[in-house]
Amino acid sequence: MEIVTQNETNVTHIPQKKSLSPLAIARKKFIKNKLAMTSLIFLALVAIISCLAPYITTADITKINIGEMGLEPSSKHWLGTDKAGRDVFTRLLYGGRISLLVGISCTIFVIFIGTLIGSIAGYFGGTADSLLMRFTDLILNFPFLVFVIVLNAILFGKVSGLWVLIGVISLLYWGGIARIVRSKILAEKENEYIIAAISIGCSPAKIIVKHLLPNVLSTIIVQATITFATMIVVESALSYLGFGVPQEVPSWGNMLNSANEPDVLQYKLWIWVPPALIITLTILSINFIGEGLKDAFNPKSRR
Amino acid sequence: MSTKKSLLKEAPLLEVKNLETAFDIDGIDYNAVDNVSFKVKPRQIVGVVGESGCGKSVMSLSIMQLLPKGSGKVKSGEILFEGLNLEKLTESQINKIRGKDISMIFQEPMTSLNPVFTIGYQLQEVLFNHTKISKQEARQKAIALLKSVGISRPEKIVDEYPHQLSGGMRQRVMIAIAIACQPKLLIADEPTTALDVTVQAQILELLKDIQAVNDMSVILITHDLGVVAEMCDEVIVMYAGKIVERTDVDTLFYNPKHPYTTLLLGAIPKMEEEAERLSSIKGIVPSLTNMPKSGCRFANRCPMAMPECLTITPELAEADQGHEVACLLFETSKPREGVQ
């Protein structure tokens, strides 16, 4: 009953490495990408230093120090002090924690909601698709800034300010991801292996989680990095305008806020240049990582 | 086959009764499968032949309840599998049957396997779906299955990804997945169309061996009459969604009754003749939206068409012992008086 083709039997036994999964191949390609790896290392450094902030500096981040207002950088205050006499370097480190926390948690929520809604709409189609997509359109049509300000005002004081912001941003930002995931799933589910999977008795939930999502994972990961960068910008922008993280909590956006005074903008560069620089560098590196991931997941690129 | 006589008295494994599958195009239902009835007995290989667009694949998808959601649906008729109407089952009930009692092999081995999982994972998946089995046992079973479909080095292949295998090997893997739970019925939808001729012969041989070992019934969908002659016990000839002739394989080749079957057989190139051009049937299968409303659907391509062929719809009826045909050339196919 066994039929063995000739060329299969005559293969000399070459010691072979274990076959690589598509994910492992992508990882190998990513590691070879110098720019993306440098960015990753930079981002990791920023994250680690921010997390270790309490061990690196001991200065109080919220206490207003009237005696040391607007001091230039010196050996005591490496990056000087701001208008309230708080150490800029310390606030930069603590600010990184907040900015990255907002960025990461918003990204996780946005990707989760977007993927859930997008994959259900894409897989089931029909009425479920229409309902979910019209809901998505509704969310996308909300004027983002106005909504954030209003919701922030309503919820302020009831919940910790930071999590209000994260919740509001997440609830308003998943629409784009849902659309992308839906269109990807729509294309992917036409593949014959999906019919084959149904024909061996897989339930819809299993088809979505085990067969469809791994095949659109590359898109989701790339989208996640882009979302991450966007979220940091959104947080900074809102905080700069004064609608983001509560004023007493240091974040990169909050630190920029003081730059709207002409005096600071013109003569006290040390107060606003460091946070501006670190925001730019962080977003740049996240985007480089995203580009690197896109290349790594693209089977046609040979870089 | 020697089993043919003993098959006659057994209850059918699958019985399709007056199946009508329709596609919704711009709000109007068009029947891709129209009033099709047939039976598959245990251990029987039934061939379904016809040109492209005859409704063969749609029929098999209807049996598996795999029609594309939203556009295609079974309008009427019954699909009885061991007496159970598959049409009436819920999604989770049919999932218990798919892959276990009925399984399917698809036309395109290159795209039928999920690119992100190993061969072993995809084989084990069907086992986990339908049996209580430990991971270790499943892996052993997967290796054994790969071996049984003629893959050498199964211990190696089990950890490889689909892109590392050739088309023929992938189709073997697909067969291994399909037979993993020893189904009673295997639907093979043009299993060899995408493969080259030598591999085709191996795959058919393999299917036949597995059928004999596992005591399965097989519905073999093909447009290759050579494959039919090689494999099948019984043959159904379909044209434009309807069965035009149904008989055993020998009768079909030596005594075809329907003009369409005769023309199909005439289109097989013969080695001893030196023909400049291959003979073909003029015209094409009418598309779903252009199907003639009344009369025989083959009438406008039929060399033997009579005036009444355009108005009277022939019925599938037994013209000889065990030989059904739907053509007005035979008295039996003419509608009885008083019945429209």
Image (tube, helix red, strand yellow):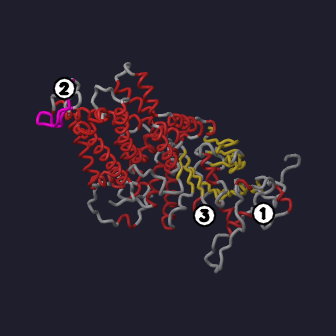
Q: Is residue B122 left or right of residue A63?
A: right
Across and down, in percent, residue B333 comes to: 80, 55
Instruction: Please give the chain letter of the residue carrying mark 1.
Output: B
Considering the image in quadrants, where does the N terminus of chain A appear? bottom left
- Residue A60's mark? 2
Residue closest to the eye, A114 or A197: A114
Q: Is residue A77 magenta?
A: yes
Q: Secondary structure at mark 2?
A: loop
Query: Which residue lies at the image location 22% right of the left edge and 42% below the top edge?
Result: A45
Q: Determine which quarter of the picture holds residue A224.
A: top left
The residue labelled by disc 3 is B224
Q: Are marks 3 and 2 on the same chain?
A: no
Q: Is residue A241 left or right of residue B194?
A: left
Across and down, in percent, residue B249 comes to: 65, 60
**Which region shows up in magenta?**
A64-81
Residue closest to the eye, A203 or A162: A162
**Please, what is the three-letter code of the amino acid marked with disc 3?**
Asp
The answer for how far apart the CA atoms under marks 3 and 2 are is 83 Å
**Please, what is the three-letter code of the amino acid marked with disc 2?**
Asp
Q: Earlier in the sequence, mark 3 or mark 1?
A: 3
The residue labelled by disc 1 is B300
